[in-house]
Amino acid sequence: MQKFTFECSTCGKNYHESEVRYLCPECNEINTSYLPPKGVLKTIYGYRKNQFPGSYSLSESVMQFKELKKFQYIDILPINNASSLPKLKVGETPLYLIEQIVGVKLSVNLYFKDDSQNPTYSFKDRASALVSAYAKEKGFDTIVAASTGNAGSSLAGICASQSQNAIILVPESAPLAKLTQIIMYGAKLIPVKGTYDDAFDLSVQASAQFGWYNRNTAFNPLTIEGKKTVSFELFEQLGYKLPNRIFVPTGDGVILSGVYKGFEDLLKYGIIDKIPIVVAVQSSGSDNLVRNISNPEFQSIKSDTLADSISVDIPRNFYMAQQYLQIYNGEMLTVTDEEILSASAQLSKNTGLFAEPASAAAFAGFLSYNRHHKLEENSVNVVLLTGSGLKDLKSVTQMINMPKSIEPTLENLGKRIKDNH
Ligand SMILES: *Cc1c(COP(=O)(O)O)cnc(C)c1O
């Protein structure tokens, strides 16, 4: 019996696992590089214990969930053995409840899900781990990815832990820390003249030509499946309850779809009876996903934002993200680079969590909501922190002053402390 099938998110056609690996062959037209691809595949399980939503009592749902968790969710993952996953600890990241921001007590509950605590310091490890496990089970020893930074550094690290080869094609402009990670993890780093899209196309050709497994975001449907585990963790960490809102930093829309897919799996399993509100947060300098949501024709505007991880001209999972946001009444907003930097500083100072600009954008989204009183009192809000601040120091150094050194005397020290106040 097959455990799962792939369903085309565009035409709805169902494929046996062995029939298709990446996009739906019928919907993926060639030469559409300037438009988001159609035919991204959704992974559908038997949901063997299928019940109708809400048909379990609360304690039965919790029991069902614990049963799933006991076997590392293997019933709703597209691999055969949890032992194929890397030994590094991916996921199971902390969830912190924050009581106050800048001394102001919040009238809502604010949680941070800190995915910078993944092995390569970003949310991308959730996807890389599953792609790597699948490759292991299918006998691929080389995985290729086009990446602007985090997906590449993540794949490089995960492959290093699994004795697999990683080949990472990057556009020339990725942040230095992420490139350094790729090299330190022993992957082949290939900078490509041109844009992310050029690197993407080359990686797809290379997979076909050299037989490498391809991890490109959304192109490989397992990237969505890997990312969905965050929703399982949230449900558990919130005491088997759903949050009111989840603020998700959004570029290609794969994390967003992953969050939805996780809850949708639980819904289909009968464990939960509704889907929480997901808020897609984009940078106003790169808002190609939210700006096009209701447009009859997709129009890309060239990105200009310091949040490099969500700087995306052609969102690779646009259509699936659009479907999810429309079906489940998702919300959207944009934040400026100034708001992102200010949110980043507030986050670090108030919580000790140092996030890269893309993650700080999600918090900026929360702050914007809170300022406009759009959050119900006592509502439960989660902000996804998707990457570590150490990955991109350059963008924050523009707002800090590195202090000059002093002569080592008490007098000078006292004076310096006084001057700073
Ligand atoms: C990739 C990434 C995102 C955005 O995810 P998408 O799936 O492209 O929407 C957000 N934050 C960080 C740190 C990332 O690396």
Image (cartoon, rainbow, N blue to C red):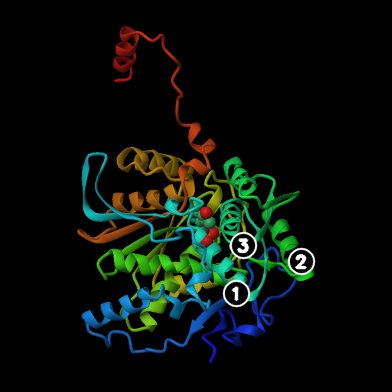
Mark 2 belongs to which amino acid? Answer: Gln
Percent coordinates x, y for residue 271 in the rendering:
32, 80
Q: What is the C-alpha distance between the residues marked 3 and 1?
A: 40 Å
Identify which residue is drawn at 39% across, 38% down.
345
Does residue 51 appear left or right of residue 359 in this picture?
A: left
Identify which residue is drawn at 62% across, 69% down.
219
Does residue 121 appear left or right of residue 417 in this picture?
A: right
Work out whether 85 lies above or below 302: below
Front of the two marks 2 and 1? 1
Q: Secondary structure at mark 3?
A: loop
Q: Secondary structure at mark 1?
A: helix
Q: Earlier in the sequence, mark 3 or mark 2?
A: 2
Q: What is the C-alpha distance between the residues marked 2 and 1?
A: 23 Å
Q: Which mark is residue 205?
A: 2
The residue identified by callout 3 is 299
Work out whether 31 lies above or below 247: below
Q: What is the C-alpha distance between the residues marked 3 and 2?
A: 26 Å
Does residue 246 appear left or right of residue 139 in this picture?
A: left
Percent coordinates x, y for residue 330 in the rendering:
40, 68
Percent coordinates x, y for residue 204 in the rendering:
72, 66
Mark 3 crowdedness (10 Å alpha carbons): few <14, some 14-19, many ≥20: some
Mark 1 belongs to which amino acid? Answer: Glu
Q: Which mark is residue 137?
A: 1
Pick whichever, 383 or 190, lies toward us: 190
Q: Earlier in the sequence, mark 3 or mark 1?
A: 1
Pick whichever, 368 or 128, lies toward us: 128
